[in-house]
Image (tube, rainbow, N blue to C red):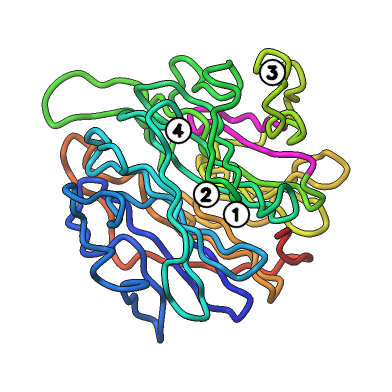
Amino acid sequence: MSVSRTDRVFVNFPHWGDKVQYSVAEVRNGKTVPYPNREINTADTRDPAHHFLGVQSVVVDAADRLWVVDTGRIQFGNAPVGGPKLVAIDLRTNKVIRTILLPRQVAGPRSFVNDVRLDLTRGKAGTAYLTDASSDGPNGLIVVDLASGTSWRRLNNVPSVRPVPDFVPVIDGKRMLNRPAHGPTSPINIGSDGIALSPDGKTLYYCPLSSRTLYSVPTSGLTDRRVADSEIAKTVRNLGTKGMSDGLETDNAGRVYGGDIEHNALVFRDTDGRFRTLVHDNRLIWPDTLSIGYDRNLYVMANQLNRQAAYNAGVDLRRKPYVLYRIPVDGGPARR
């Protein structure tokens, strides 16, 4: 979910075993409308480069363009070549203006490209940073040079991007595990997921989903391909315990926001380095896809992910409608 400069709201609908009619939508008069059109939202594995297959994130950049992160995976199946991609849509014309395909060595068939942040001031046309949250493949960060479309992996499978071994959160008063209708339970091992960029573009924040820790790394090493991954890993900072978070966001004052899923809360790391609770409300059932608007509000979805059938012995416990909440914050977006 993301909010444009003109307060247009965009949401995405991943293919998580649901009958998804479209992957990207704009919210108009309280209803979702396929965006930018229905054709591109029609999943077609015969032409994966020109169709959304499994969109995981939508983010508006500083130039008011919508960037779509497509995992290329439908219902967690393998991603075909041309499936994982980054797509830019001009919000003035509502037309696709750029499609950057992520090659196999960057996003393989079991990669799960999850979220993106953009810095249009770094490089000739800007730089994108993405997370690979795969539950059964290598985790890491992905860097994309927007001028050339060239992409590369960073911090590949280092401990800070990996899930905490045997991590079992407690949500809705219940231990959350993979709980198939038949067969044994198992921990949910999801790696680098949430991502956010500091207002000056010098620091990238990230967190594995199966963890409660927030990490940071200087962007200078991520973007300089002459620097070895082993050297970048030495610059990673453990910023402490923030709670289990899916999405992250920053404001223009330098605060880092995230969910505390286990406590139905939103937290933030203040400029003094301390974590504080922004809001606690039992309606925040799996808060995710955080976005700060120019109206100085934090927007967040309660997507009820923990109530899906895969985690409840085949029984879907989600209750519609899903809700988008808006919370006033003392800051605007940190878009560059």
First-in-chain label (3 vs 2) = 3
**Camera-side residue of 144 and 23:** 144
**Location of mark 4 (residue):** 133
User: Does the rendering let one see residue 244?
Assistant: yes
In the depicted view, which residue is nearer to us: 283 or 101?
A: 101
313 sits to left or right of 103:
left
The alpha-carbon separation of the residues under discs 3 and 2 comes to 32 Å
Q: Which residue is mark 2?
A: 264
Is residue 19 depicted above or below 308 in this figure?
below
Of the 4 image quadrants, the one containing the C terminus is bottom right
- Mark closest to the chain's N terminus, 3 or 1: 3
Q: Is residue 204 magenta?
A: yes
The relative height of residue 88 versus residue 257 in the rendered view (above or below) is below
Placement of 83 over or under 303, stated as above or below: above
Foreground: 277 or 271? 271
Question: Which residue is disc 3 drawn over?
Answer: 233
Which dot, 3 or 4, sits closer to the camera?
Answer: 3
How crowded is the residue under tag 3: few (<14 C-alpha within 10 Å), some, or many (20+)?
some
**Cα–Cα gap, marks 3 and 4:** 18 Å
